[in-house]
Image (tube, helix red, strand yellow):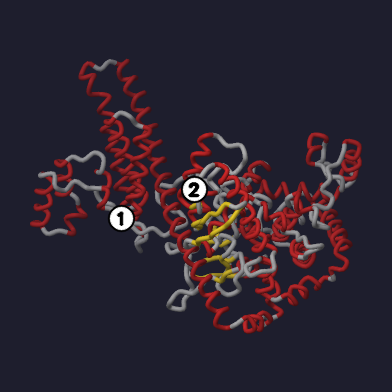
């Protein structure tokens, strides 16, 4: 794992530039197809913090000191190691019940279950490793390859296949576009056209031109090339492999020391005994390990046992413990489990959930415990949970449903009063001139001569505001709003009316943010909100005017109904405006973070190459064993 480089000033290099006080930014692995999470500790922290601000490390970027995952950026600093994070951020995490006996379960997790899982994943048997299944994981193939440092610049490869020669110009964009193609054998005419365009862009034949025969040869070669890179990264013996990275962090001897702490010669017996202890406790206590309230021990147990239940089937062939007891039970076996549980007053298994029943009663109890925690974390059903393992493998999956009237998101936003933002769609030079003359804020800032000059310019139409008058972020928000309005309101008069309400809403939502005075924020917000009411009254007038003074009681009822429709539409576009602003701020900052992460990966890669070249391998090896005994827990982060 590459270590996050320091800044030029020797200070921590922040990944989140626009960080907000007391907001946690968790750096972790991307989501993948085969597992609920590649890292047990990432899953623990993600569950405990119920965090929404996750940063993708692209499988490559580790923390500044240890080079491990997870780590967090918090208030302009980094905290490394899951235990350190949980201690430092105890006031921000999920409010958990504390129990004096939970250390026993946490000890089982850290000293037995995690080492057994690590042993299964990292130790090779007959040339095979528990991580072999990751080679074919589409989430890894599509997310890792394109961000490998060696492809951040163009890399030219000349290859020969069956007497055909090709020169490939490979970079990040090459892989991005390659994985967007249909890579199967069943191709439509449109698929073939896209493939030909791709080949002409990145591949040059030594002789002749392209046809689909070339694609078949090239695609097979590329698949093998990808297999080899992933094999080397996750469980190869060369530089860059996760197995080697484990060795690089602490050294092979210290890994052995860690795994042997609990005498893994008796792993199967230990696993079986601890499984019984956990299952018996769950039978006697109910929903969770210590009763009806969640504890840290529950989350610790969940984060590791879910790996045992949801490993890829390809993994089970090479593993002794993962998946143990996962064989489903049959009808005749179910009664025994139900009777066993009812004897303890816990009769929760029924014929209705036969599909979720396992042959080992302990596995059944633990399975129900895992599913219960998933629901506690906000996943309504297992389908929602499994959706995290489906392309596009969304890291920050939560969706905001309720937007306040003032931005309170996870990023620092600094704005001024956003004066004249509301005039971008429906500009009236006379109204603008009057607003300049009577606007208190403008009078405070300007001498009378300057003020009358501005009024004069407004009357001449020279003061019409443009999108470009505002900063980059506001421009992006306004452009997205205008695009939405174009797609949803087809009558120009309505588009101006409701569009102006939406612009006023954005101004109220964002004006005077990031300053020292909350009072100024609130005053600005209230001023804009009152403008929304004025705009709604103007829309009411469009209903009344055609009826004139002859309005009857029946017409009055009609007017009231139309006003209610206007209110409903106004509320809809206000909510939509806040949603667009919120999502754009999130997207804007996530794009900046993504660029910073990729930049850090490239620099860390260059630093590591230079160090190896200057110091020599022997010097590097001497450093592998400098970590103290107390730092053995770093292995748990993997």
As helix, strand or loop, the secondary structure at mark 2 comes to loop
Between 351 and 436, which is closer to the camera in this rendering? 351
Residue bearing the label numbered 2 = 208
Instruction: Give the structural element (helix, strand or loop) at label 1.
Output: loop
Q: Return the x and y of residue 308 as percentages of the image width and height.
A: 76, 54
Dot 2 or dot 1, earlier in sequence = 2
Q: Quadrant of residue 380?
A: top right
Give the x, y percent position of residue 554.
Answer: 32, 15
* Lateral position of residue 200 relative to residue 563, left or right: right
**Residue 497 placement: quadrant:** top left
Q: Does residue 450 appear in this view?
A: yes
Structural distance between the alpha carbons of marks 2 and 1: 51 Å
Which of these two is toward me, 35 or 430? 35
What residue do we see at 31% from left, 52% from top?
524
Q: Nearer the viewer, mark 2 or mark 1?
A: 2
**434 with respect to 560 (left or right):** left
Task: Name the foreground residue: 260 vs 560.
Answer: 260
Q: Residues within 10 Å of mark 1 (few under 14, many from 20)?
A: few
Q: Could you tell me which quadrant the C terminus lies in?
A: bottom right
Residue 544 located left or right of residue 282: left
Disc 2, disc 1: CB below 8 Å? no
Q: Position of residue 291 (x, y in %)?
A: 76, 53
> Few, some or many C-alpha atoms within 10 Å of disc 2 (few <14, some 14-19, many ≥20)?
few
Residue indicated by mark 1: 471
**Residue 104 seen anywhere in this rendered image of the structure:** no
Side of 570 relative to 89 (left or right): left
Q: On screen, 166 above or below 358? A: below
Total marks in image: 2
Quadrant of the snapshot with the N terminus: bottom right
Q: Which mark is residue 322?
A: none
Residue 424 lies, in percent from the top left, at 25, 43
Task: Please determine whether, in this image, residue 470 is positioned above or below residue 151.
Answer: above
């Amino acid at each position: 794992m590459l270590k996050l480089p320091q800044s030029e000033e020797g200070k921590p290099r922040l990944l989140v530039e626009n960080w907000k006080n007391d907001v946690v930014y968790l750096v972790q692995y991307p989501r993948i197809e085969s597992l609920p999470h590649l890292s047990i500790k990432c899953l623990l922290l993600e569950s405990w913090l119920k965090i929404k601000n996750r940063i993708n490390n692209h499988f490559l970027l580790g923390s500044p000191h240890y080079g491990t995952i997870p780590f967090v950026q918090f208030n302009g600093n980094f905290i490394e190691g899951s235990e350190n994070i949980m201690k430092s951020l105890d006031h921000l995490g999920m409010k958990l019940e504390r129990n004096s006996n939970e250390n026993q379960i946490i000890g089982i997790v850290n000293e037995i279950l995690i080492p057994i899982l690590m042993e299964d994943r990292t130790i090779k048997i007959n040339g095979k490793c528990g991580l072999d299944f990751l080679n074919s994981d589409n989430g890894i193939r599509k997310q890792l390859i394109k961000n490998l440092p060696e492809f951040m610049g163009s890399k030219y490869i000349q290859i020969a296949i069956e007497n055909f020669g090709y020169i490939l110009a490979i970079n990040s964009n090459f892989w991005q576009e390659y994985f967007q193609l249909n890579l199967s054998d069943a191709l439509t005419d449109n698929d073939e056209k896209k493939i030909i365009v791709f080949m002409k862009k990145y591949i040059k034949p030594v002789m002749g031109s392209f046809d689909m025969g070339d694609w078949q040869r090239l695609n097979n070669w590329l698949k093998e090339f990808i297999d080899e890179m992933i094999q080397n990264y996750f469980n190869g013996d060369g530089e860059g492999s996760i197995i080697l990275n484990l060795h690089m962090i602490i050294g092979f001897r210290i890994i052995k020391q860690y795994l042997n702490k609990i005498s893994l010669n008796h792993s199967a017996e230990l696993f079986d005994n601890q499984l019984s202890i956990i299952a018996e406790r769950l039978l006697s206590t109910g929903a969770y390990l210590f009763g009806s309230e969640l504890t840290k021990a529950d989350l610790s147990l969940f984060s590791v046992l879910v790996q045992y239940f949801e490993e890829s089937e390809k993994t089970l062939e090479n593993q002794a413990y993962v998946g143990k007891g996962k064989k489903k039970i049959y009808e005749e076996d179910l009664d025994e489990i139900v009777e066993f549980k009812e004897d303890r007053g816990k009769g929760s298994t029924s014929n209705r959930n036969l599909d979720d029943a396992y042959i080992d009663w302990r596995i059944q109890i633990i399975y129900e415990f895992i599913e219960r925690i998933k629901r506690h974390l906000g996943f309504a059903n297992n389908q929602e949970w499994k959706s995290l393992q489906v392309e596009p493998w969304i890291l920050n999956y939560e969706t905001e449903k309720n937007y306040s009237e003032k931005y309170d998101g996870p990023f620092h936003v600094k704005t001024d009063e956003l004066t004249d933002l509301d005039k971008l769609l429906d500009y009236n030079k006379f109204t603008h001139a009057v607003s300049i003359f009577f606007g208190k804020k403008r009078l405070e800032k300007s001498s009378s001569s300057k003020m009358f000059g501005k009024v004069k310019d407004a009357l001449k139409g020279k003061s019409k505001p443009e999108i470009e008058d505002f900063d980059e972020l506001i421009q992006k928000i306004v452009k997205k709003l205008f695009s939405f309005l174009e797609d949803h309101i087809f009558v120009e008069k309505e588009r101006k009316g409701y569009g102006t309400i939406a612009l006023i809403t954005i101004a109220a939502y964002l004006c005077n943010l990031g300053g020292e005075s909350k009072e100024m924020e609130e005053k600005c917000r209230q001023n804009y909100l009152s403008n929304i009411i004025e705009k709604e009254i103007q829309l009411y007038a469009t209903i009344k005017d055609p009826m004139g003074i002859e309005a009857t009681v029946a017409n009055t009822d009609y007017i009231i109904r139309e006003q209610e429709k206007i209110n409903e539409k106004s509320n809809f576009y206000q909510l939509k405006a806040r949603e667009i602003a919120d999502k754009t701020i999130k997207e804007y900052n996530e794009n900046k973070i993504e660029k910073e992460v990729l930049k850090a990966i490239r620099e860390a890669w260059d630093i590591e190459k230079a160090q190896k070249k200057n110091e020599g391998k022997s010097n590097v090896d001497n450093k592998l064993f400098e970590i103290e005994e107390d730092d053995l827990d770093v292995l748990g982060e993997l």
